[in-house]
Amino acid sequence: MADQRKPIVTDRDIPEVAGQYDRFPYPERRPEDERGRLISTWLDDLRMINHHCFRGEQTFDKNFRVLVAGGGTGDGTIFLAEQLRPLGGHVVHLDFSTAALSVARERARIRGLRNIEWVEASLLALPQLGLGTFDLINCVGVLHHLREPEQGLDALLEVLAPEGAMALLVYARYGRTGVYQMQELLRRINRDESDATVRLARARATLAALPRSNWFLRGEDLHRDHVEGGDAGLYDLLLHPQDRAYTVPELYEWLTDRQGLTIEFSDWHRGMLPYLVEHYFEPRQPELLSLVRTYPAREQHAIAELIGGDIATHSLFATRVSKSKATYGDLDFVPVFVNEKATGEDFVQLIERHNDLPFVLQHAQSRLQRRLDPGRFVKEIFRHMDGTRTFREIFNLVQQPPLSPVPTEAQFWEEFRPWYAALETIERLVLRRPGAYQGLQGFSLR
């Protein structure tokens, strides 16, 4: 049974925001659905977190502590706790909505998860709660709903372990252009109306009346909460009382320049791809690409955001450690496929279908298109890639029987590099050390 004490909030919290999430717990979830599926949340796959934030070395053992700040109805909390359950890791779920926390607790009860601590409080109260420090903090879709997002980040940093990591998601300005047009429209229509039911009804009626010229309809494929998220989704998207968004330069200025954090963008199922200028300029505009590649990386990312225009949220990993990502070129790393059921043999067959000649690798979900050359060794490297072998073991197997002339390690690395770069860019291939976390087994993810 949920704790009936009032949640701990601060005078910096916005009462209307707390009221919204008590009325419309977000996202809408039926706890009974936990009996048949596990929802995977993009930034919370421990294999990706290990690759980006812990140099591929993390075991996520019993001493590993996670904070889900603003955990809502529990998607991130449940996924993280399920991954950590066999390892002994611990999750703290923090939220100031009694209704949302009640849904999350019931989902955990149905799954039999006992490695979650429930704290009914605002993240702005974190420094006063005495919860200790955390190795990983998840704060997805929360900071942009605070009156002063900077205060929220400061509170998170106070409880982040020195070598810990954060998974953050905030709204992106350009991809939400139509959303802000609709929010302004609905504010004007509902200017004298405070009843949430009436506001929702008016929003649905307005959506039904929109002409195709409306910017929200033009970019509707970028936003599905109003279609698939029920009342909670529509309210959160178009009627939220506090909502702001960021551009790439604003995030670098805030997170890197002011807070000293190293950040790594990872868009949902596209990874870093929409932040790369080559995704848009290559191969049709080689001169323009050559020019832009002379600019600092953060400026290239800003340009890519403006070109694509379809980044609706910025999701990213952030660490205080400058070199927290597993790096290509180490023989003792294990390459691991993630985020879809790909195998090394799938790539062997793909290369053979193209007669072992260069071809354009296309990935529909991320929209990756990259011309790649299988060379002499790439197919055989994929053939021996099984998620447990290190590059050293893979390269040794490729050399059996001995090739003539015998290739050097440098030749192996050089031929496979473009393939690794393409797949790592879209979060389909990551690295881990032997003995580090291998992944969740035995679940059907959604």
Image (cartoon, grey):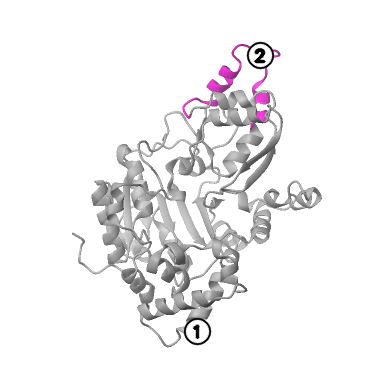
- The reply to whether callout 1 and callout 2 are in contact (CB within 8 Å) is no
Q: What residue is at 42 percent from the left and 33 percent from the top?
A: 436
Reply above or below: 139 against 235: above
Q: CA distance from mark 1 to mark 2?
A: 73 Å
Reply above or below: 132 against 224: above
Percent position of residue 432, x then y: 48, 34
Reply above or below: 191 against 75: below
The kind of residue on which mark 1 rests is Arg
Percent position of residue 385, x then y: 53, 27
Q: Label 1's element?
A: helix
Q: Which residue is mark 1?
A: 188
Nearest the viewer among 25 and 151 is 25
Which of the 4 image quarters holds residue 3?
bottom left
Nearest the viewer among 247 and 222 is 222
The kind of residue on which mark 2 rests is Leu
Q: Label 2's element?
A: loop
Bounds of the magenta span? 387-416
Percent position of residue 289, x then y: 76, 50
Q: Is residue 442 left or right of residue 241?
A: left
> Which residue reaches farthest left?
1
Residue 140 is at least partly visible in this image = yes
The crowd level at tag 1 (other Cα within 10 Å; few <14, some 14-19, many 20+) is few
Q: Which mark is residue 403?
A: 2
Which of the 4 image quarters holds residue 304?
bottom right
Percent position of residue 401, x then y: 60, 11
Count every numbered label the image shows and give the total: 2
The crowd level at tag 2 (other Cα within 10 Å; few <14, some 14-19, many 20+) is few
Quick one: label 1 or label 2, which is nearer the N terminus? Answer: 1
Which of the 4 image quarters holds residue 177?
bottom right
Nearest the viewer among 369 and 430 is 369
In the rendered structure, does residue 59 fall within the stretch colored magenta?
no
Residue 113 is at least partly visible in this image = no
